[in-house]
Image: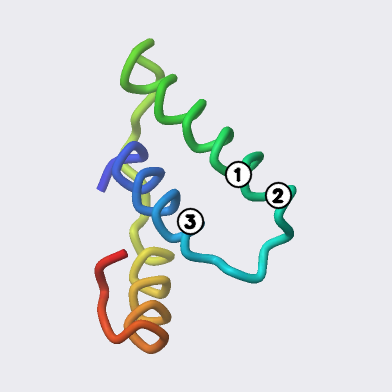
Amino acid sequence: MNRLEKLKFEKQVAKRLTLLPFQMKPLIDEYYNREIDAIEKYGGSNPVVNSDSLTEIEKIMEGVYGTKET
C-alpha cells in the first residue's frame, strides 16, 4: 500500500470519529486534504508504507460498525 491510499483511508476513518471536539474536525480534514493534494497535484513523495496499522483500524471498525468499509 502506498502513502496516498493510506491517507485516503485514514481521512474516511477520521470523518466517522464522533468524540472529537467540533473545532478539531476541520483541522483534521484540512491536514488530510493538504497531504493528499501534495501527492496528487504536486507529485509529492508517495512511498510504500506498512499497512499493519490499517489492519488494526479495520479490525476496530469491523467491531464498532460491523464492516471494514468506512
Where residue 35 appears, x then y in whole percent? Answer: 48, 29
Residue at 36%, 47% (x, y): give it.
Answer: 49
Three-letter amino acid code at disc 3? Answer: Lys
CA distance for labels 2 and 1: 6 Å
**Which residue has dot 3 on it?**
15
Three-letter amino acid code at disc 1? Answer: Ile
**Which residue has dot 2 on it?**
24
Tell me whether circle 2 and circle 1 mark residues in contact (CB < 8 Å).
yes
Determine the image quadrant of residue 57. Answer: bottom left
Q: Is residue 30 shown left or right of residue 19?
A: left
Where residue 26 appears, x then y in whole percent? Answer: 62, 41
Where residue 15 appears, x then y in whole percent? Answer: 48, 56
Residue at 41%, 85% (x, y): give it.
Answer: 64
Q: Earlier in the sequence, mark 2 or mark 3?
A: 3
Determine the image quadrant of residue 7. Answer: top left
Judged from the image, the secondary structure of the residue bearing numbered disc 3 is helix
